[in-house]
Image (cartoon, rainbow, N blue to C red):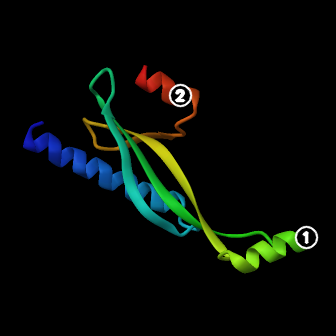
Amino acid sequence: MEERELDDLKKAINKTERYSKTVNRDEKMLNFSVEELRESKSGDFWIITVGWDILKKKQPPKNAMQLALQQIESNVFYDRTSKVFVISKKTGEVEKMVNEDSEEFYELIS
């Protein structure tokens, strides 16, 4: 990979993080990471899968057993989420954000 292309890729990765934080600004995002990186079949796009943890609070217990378990366990947990970004290599802009299990994602990679 050429140095210029590597710089463009780093910018694309940074853009996915900024975009994710903007879209999910009401949630506390932790442990942001690139999980997968590939080029589209056409070579015109970066397909970047990123993931992060979201801090969640546990629901109130519904019965005595759940109450007992919650007293032993922590009151918070993390939910891991991920999104797939399609970034134009030409413009550096986010073209779309999709879920990994969506039909659109499978069309991008097949």
Q: Residues within 10 Å of mark 2 (few under 14, many from 20)?
A: few
Judged left or right of residue 57, residue 98 is left
Question: Residue 110 lies in what quarter of the image?
Answer: top left
- Which is more foreground, mark 2 or mark 1? 1
Amino acid type at image mark 1: Asn
Q: Which mark is residue 5?
A: none
Judged left or right of residue 38, residue 75 is right
Where 71 sits versus 9, above or below?
below
Q: Position of residue 92 (x, y in %)?
A: 28, 43
Secondary structure found at label 1: loop
- Mark 2 and mark 1 lie on one chain; the one further toward the N terminus is 1
Quadrant of the snapshot with the N terminus: top left
Q: Position of residue 44 (x, y in %)?
A: 28, 28
Identity of the residue drawn at 50% across and 25% down: 106
Judged left or right of residue 8, residue 63 is right
Name the residue that disc number 1 marks.
63
Q: Position of residue 51 (x, y in %)?
A: 45, 52
Q: How many marks?
A: 2
Question: Residue 67 lies in what quarter of the image?
Answer: bottom right
Nearer the observer, 77 or 4: 77
Identity of the residue drawn at 57% across and 26% down: 103
